[in-house]
Image (tube, rainbow, N blue to C red):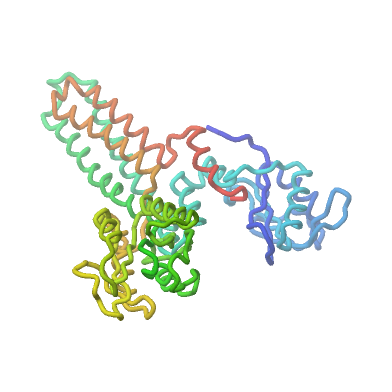
Amino acid sequence: MSLYDPDTIAAIATPPGEGGVGIVRISGSKVWAIADQLFHALDHIPVSERGHGTFAYGKVVGADGKEIDTGLALVMRAPNSYTREDVVEIQGHGGAVGMRRILRRALEAGARMAEPGEFTKRAFLNGRIDLLQAEGIFDLIRARSDRAASAAMEQMEGQLSQQFDGIYEAFLEVAANLETTLDFVEDELPDDVFSGIADLLDETFLTLDNLLDTWDEGRLLREGARVVILGRPNAGKSTLLNALLGFDRAIVSSTAGTTRDTLEEGYVLDGIPLRIIDTAGLRETDCEIEAEGVRRAEAHGQEAHLSVYLIDASEPLHEEDRARLEKLDPEKSVVVLNKVDRGRVVGDIAGIEACLVKGVGLEELKRSMADALEKGADLQAPPHAVISERHRHLLICAHKEAKQARAFLNQSVEENAVLASEHLRSALEYLGQVTGRVYHEELLESIFSRFCIGK
């Protein structure tokens, strides 16, 4: 099955902006004719006559023969390229204008502009990689922590594919064994045939459940977590943001209400990428601007994966703090009693005692934040490939169908064998969509449209 025309595509493969080197990638059946038109090697040997894995130094020329740039042409011959097609990469001087000129020349010579993710899509359709490995490439590009990058590499190298393939083959064997029984008269079958089929099916559930258990970790690594800092004015929210980041991002002042809007910054905690949001102080106010800041703070608090609520421990507990503490979800919040260096008069409130100006209590707070975020995720284990939301949805569907098949096997097996087989085929359909054994145009579009154009 082919979901693309065997034409030749081209795109800029390096990020926009200035750089030492920029790359235009060309892949497809007409690549040699196109490359010979736009690249003239210094040694006068055409690109089309060069061997796989070789470089040529020369110049890129326009249709009028005038020089556009100088650089290298890298030759990759099918099937030993990323797309398993003939590929040439033109490496010129980095810069938006220069790269666009080379790309425009490639398009004039007969290539067409690649669609987002089309190079990787061709790698999949040509059998270089499966869908799980393709998504691993996407995850590696977008990784925001070392742990996320390591997990993506495991997925790219096929670790997750092997696990899904194992489940698929087990279900396929169960389905084949079950359907074989349909050709026999009941009395001709050994007594343990159906029990053996059921036992084999049960063994697959454990592996399937173990994969589902990696979803919480996968969600954290891919999407990160939103952490919102809440509290009344002057509780030390901006001080905490600065202390976590290690530099002065937020203005700190003794004047209440200094922060009136949200401030967001990225931060990596124990391998978990975070978006830390500093908010306006929570209090009743007649100022429309400050009131809007309070409204935004409360909205972020409702959407957060974790709330860090700060209290000024050097003062008696304010009624607003008391009311908000009662509404906090203990599973999704950490309470910090700040300014304990001035004395603790806040009362019998549980929380991490800290003096954030001096960094006291900061490490304990980080551990508590990590513990709260890691619930349901094994982030202390070595980095490993983990499932995404797409994989989770398909696994749940496959699990449901397989469970239904197992339920039929628990009943009158001979009478329900056909129904059990149908449910197993549905389970195989869902599992096949994970790796790409089964695919359709909409599935590929949803995956590869998220990629950049040059990948």
- The percent position of residue 160, horizontal first and vertical second, equals 37, 50
Say whether residue 221 is visible: no
Residue 126 in the figure: left or right of residue 163: right
Residue 220: percent from left, percent from top: 38, 55
Quarter of the figure with residue 428: top left
Residue 66, x across and y down, in percent:
87, 55
Spot the residue most to the front.
286
Residue at 80% over, 49% down: 37
Q: Quadrant of residue 280?
A: bottom left
Q: Is residue 39 left or right of residue 423?
A: right
Q: How many marks?
A: 0
Q: Determine the image quadrant of residue 394.
A: top left
454 w.r.t. 449: above or below: below
Depth check: give the residue in front, 305 or 293.
Answer: 293
**Percent from the top left, x then y, of residue 243?**
42, 73
Given residues 282 and 53, the one toward you in this image is 282
Depth order, front residue of 270/318? 318
Q: Residue at x 47, y 48 (%)?
A: 135
Does residue 12 appear in this view? yes
Query: In the picture shown, does residue 414 fall above or below 7?
Result: above
Residue 451 position (above or below residue 446)? below
Q: Is residue 56 left or right of residue 130?
A: right
At x 69%, y 63%, the residue is: 18
